[in-house]
Image: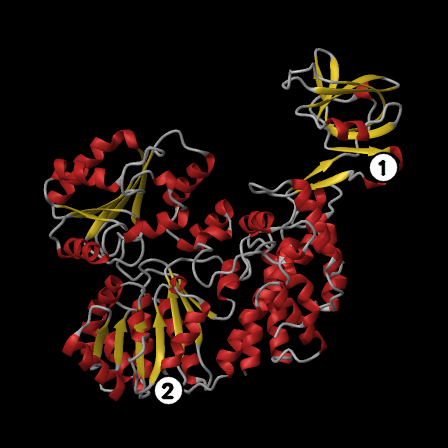
């Protein structure tokens, strides 16, 4: 299926000179990936770029060569000094000179025949390496390069330094990458010629060559022309793949779903609060999408407590008014049941027939739910991924709303619609995401943002305190729970670590039970899910007043009467995670407090994080700061399914290029959706080169 032109880039690295199984395994550790034989491909080498350079252009005389610097010396070989017989620890020395003085070239565990061939007495040679001075005498231990005067052109005066792994030397890797570069076939230009001319970018092959042959520190800068060109290629491949997926979603026949407004009006009337302006705006955007005869694919981005679930319910009601069914999917059973509890009274008030479906539903209840979904007797189902298992059939599934989108990848998203004929998709995330990252990860979606908290919610007071005040904080918790308050106490680890001086959840639980009595619960990720859910449910019900937990409570758990959260070793958490955890409180009209406990001394980044948390509750501001402090890869977690990991592009450095790539990808798909024209054919090659060939398969599937 892949164009034969690209075969040289997709062959295993074992096809290169000198790369056997052992080196192939080292390369796999370094590069990741690999075909069935376990070896990475030649193309993977091309995107493993140098991180530094060694500059060998400094060619002083021996007497003027500074200690600790890499220099290249032109010397005449005078004599060899072998180590004394039987003393294997003593070095082998070759003495040479220039007009300024003498130098000792020093070798340990010497290969004498090689040294005799390399340094013939009376010959002029060039040696390059790190200069050392011992007792006023110049020395160079194990020169990196030695060449005869006639072969000076073969000495790499500027040498790239690559990230390495065990079992792989810089020389072997550089030689292997050089051979990979030589095998790059002549490829047609896939970029818009106007963009190439405006940015003065080299061709793809020229950019690769320049990236692997830097001539100075400026050539390693991400803003250099050759690296900007390669970053743009990678971003364009990503954005084009997303645009193709989006176009296919839209092209697949949708259904115009026109609600009557009756059910949504009943739900709004039953709400104990008024909708915020951004909730009304988001709902208007969703209803406009639903009314079009195209499939909706929209991301609803809302900070903790901004009311996404209500918007999803109102969107579902609008679809149900049109005669179809809706499904709301959550990543865990606990979250699904929480959503069901929130929605049930509102669904009852509107006359919406609702059911819940998770892995726990068995027997007659499950059979009745399945029959109701198949017949259309059930309008709305709330559940986990169990909704989309085999054996679950819908009469007419019109809308799927997916909570915590980052837990599900693009391909799972596409699979969600298979249960219906023309299913619209609304995905939600409680992680505020900077615009650059929205384009990166959700470029195939329209985006609605909820930027306000519901009326009546009070600000959360955030305090930053040293761990030395622990006893005082426990006393404050004791006083608060005596007045019926509830508190979370968050720890970074489950059990005490010998390597990290970090409070463990189990040890903190034991200490708090001793201090406060049996009103303390415990929830962490190493518990069985059923036991963990039982502990959280007991906290929700008021059987526990304090819940000691790890970050398992970070997303979604809703306990409106919890008004205190203590985060121990807050300096060890990322900004986005601290913000998500803080969002577990402040979910009612009662004043709430977040106590961030740190162990001194604080590093600069940790100090900045805690200061930002104290200054603002705006999740979007916090997300932008997180991007600045940590970089895009960590904010959402690049290991999450569906997250594209970039090898060259940087979401924070190349933000402008991301915007350009998205605009270009949209223009391409509008004018040549099948990538059938001359540039379209070249862009198909781009998708393969950067591993986005899923999009090409989608094109072929029609």
The correct choice, above or below, for 304 with respect to 169 in the image is below
Question: On the image, numbered disc 1 is attached to which residue?
Answer: 152
Tell how many labels. Answer: 2
From the image, which quarter does the C terminus lie in? bottom right
Q: Is residue 77 left or right of residue 36?
A: right
Element type where label 1 sits in the image = helix
Is residue 199 visible to us here? no
The foreground one among 424 and 146 is 146
The foreground one among 676 and 71 is 71
Q: Is residue 11 left or right of residue 622?
A: right
For residue 431, which quarter of the picture? bottom left
The correct choice, above or below, for 699 with respect to 436 in the image is below
Label 1 CA crowd tier, 10 Å (few <14, some 14–19, many 20+) = few
Q: Position of residue 172 (x, y in %)?
A: 67, 44
For residue 676, which quarter of the picture? bottom right
Q: Position of residue 347 (x, y in %)?
A: 21, 76
The foreground one among 453 and 555 is 555
For residue 361, which quarter of the picture? bottom left
Question: Of marks 2 and 1, which one's residue comes earlier in the chain?
Answer: 1
Q: Is residue 447 left or right of residue 648?
A: left
Question: On the image, numbered disc 2 is attached to which residue?
Answer: 258
Element type where label 2 sits in the image = loop
Residue at 12 percent across and 45 percent down: it is 519
Is residue 240 visible to us here? yes
The correct choice, above or below, for 422 with respect to 401 in the image is below
The correct choice, above or below, for 344 with respect to 302 in the image is below
Q: Position of residue 304 (x, y in %)?
A: 33, 58
Residue at 33 percent across and 72 percent down: it is 312
């Amino acid at each position: 299926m892949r164009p034969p032109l690209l075969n040289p880039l997709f062959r295993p690295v074992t096809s290169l000179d000198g790369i056997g199984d052992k080196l192939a395994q080292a390369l796999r550790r370094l590069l990741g990936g690999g075909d069935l034989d376990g070896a990475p491909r030649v193309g993977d080498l091309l995107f493993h770029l140098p991180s530094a350079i060694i500059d060998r252009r400094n060619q002083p005389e021996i007497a003027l060569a500074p200690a600790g610097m890499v220099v290249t010396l032109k010397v005449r070989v005078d004599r060899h000094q072998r180590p004394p017989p039987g003393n294997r620890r003593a070095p082998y020395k070759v003495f040479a000179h220039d007009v300024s003085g003498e130098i000792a070239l020093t070798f340990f565990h010497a290969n004498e025949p090689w040294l005799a061939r390399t340094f013939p007495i009376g010959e002029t040679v060039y040696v390059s390496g790190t200069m050392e001075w011992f007792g006023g005498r110049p020395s160079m231990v194990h020169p990196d390069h030695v060449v005869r005067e006639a072969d000076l052109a073969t000495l790499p005066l500027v040498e790239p330094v690559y990230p390495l792994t065990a079992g792989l030397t810089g020389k072997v890797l550089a030689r292997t990458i050089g051979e990979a570069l030589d095998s790059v076939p002549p490829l047609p230009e896939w970029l818009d010629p106007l963009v190439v001319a405006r940015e003065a970018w080299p061709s793809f092959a020229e950019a690769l060559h320049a990236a692997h042959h830097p001539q100075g520190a400026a050539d390693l800068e991400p803003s250099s022309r050759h690296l900007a060109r390669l970053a743009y290629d990678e971003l364009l491949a990503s954005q084009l793949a997303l645009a193709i997926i989006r176009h296919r979603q839209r092209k697949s026949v949708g259904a115009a779903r026109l609600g009557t407004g009756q059910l949504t009006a009943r739900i709004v009337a039953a709400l104990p609060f008024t909708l915020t302006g951004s909730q009304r705006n988001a709902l208007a955007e969703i209803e406009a999408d639903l009314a079009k005869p195209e499939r909706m694919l929209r991301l609803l981005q809302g900070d903790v407590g901004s009311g996404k679930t209500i918007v999803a319910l109102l969107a579902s009601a609008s679809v149900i008014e049109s005669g179809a069914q809706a499904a709301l999917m959550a990543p865990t059973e606990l979250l699904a049941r929480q959503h069901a509890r929130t929605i049930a009274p509102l669904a009852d008030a509107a006359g919406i027939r609702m059911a819940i479906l998770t892995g726990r539903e068995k027997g007659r209840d499950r059979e009745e739910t399945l029959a109701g979904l198949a017949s259309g007797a059930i309008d709305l189902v709330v559940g986990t991924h169990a909704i989309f298992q085999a054996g679950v059939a819908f009469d007419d599934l019109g809308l799927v709303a997916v909570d915590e989108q980052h837990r599900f990848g693009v391909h799972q998203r596409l699979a969600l619609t298979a249960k219906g004929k023309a299913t619209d998709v609304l995905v939600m995330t409680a992680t505020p995401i900077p615009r650059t990252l929205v384009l990166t990860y959700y470029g195939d979606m329209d985006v609605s943002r909820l930027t306000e908290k519901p009326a009546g919610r009070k600000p959360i007071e955030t305090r930053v305190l040293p761990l030395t005040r622990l006893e005082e904080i426990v006393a404050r918790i004791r006083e608060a729970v005596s007045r019926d308050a509830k508190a979370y106490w968050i720890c970074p680890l489950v059990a005490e670590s010998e390597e990290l001086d970090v409070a463990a959840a189990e040890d903190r639980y034991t200490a708090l039970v001793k201090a406060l009595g049996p009103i303390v619960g415990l929830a962490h990720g190493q518990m069985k899910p059923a036991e963990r859910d039982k502990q959280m449910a007991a906290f929700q019900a008021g059987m526990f007043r304090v819940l000691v937990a790890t970050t398992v409570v970070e997303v979604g758990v809703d306990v409106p009467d919890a008004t205190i959260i203590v985060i121990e070793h807050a300096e060890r958490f990322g900004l986005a995670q601290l913000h998500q955890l803080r969002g577990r409180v402040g979910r009612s009209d009662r004043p709430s407090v977040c106590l961030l406990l740190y162990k001194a001394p604080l590093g600069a980044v940790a100090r900045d994080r805690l200061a930002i948390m104290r200054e603002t509750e705006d999740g979007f501001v916090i997300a932008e700061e997180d991007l600045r402090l940590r970089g895009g890869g960590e904010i959402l977690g690049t290991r999450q399914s569906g997250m594209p990991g970039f090898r060259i592009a940087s979401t924070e450095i190349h933000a402008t290029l991301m915007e350009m790539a998205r605009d270009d990808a949209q223009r391409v798909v509008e004018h040549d959706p099948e990538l059938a024209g001359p540039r379209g054919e070249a862009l198909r090659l781009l998708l393969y080169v950067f591993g986005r060939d899923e999009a090409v398969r989608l094109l072929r599937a029609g």
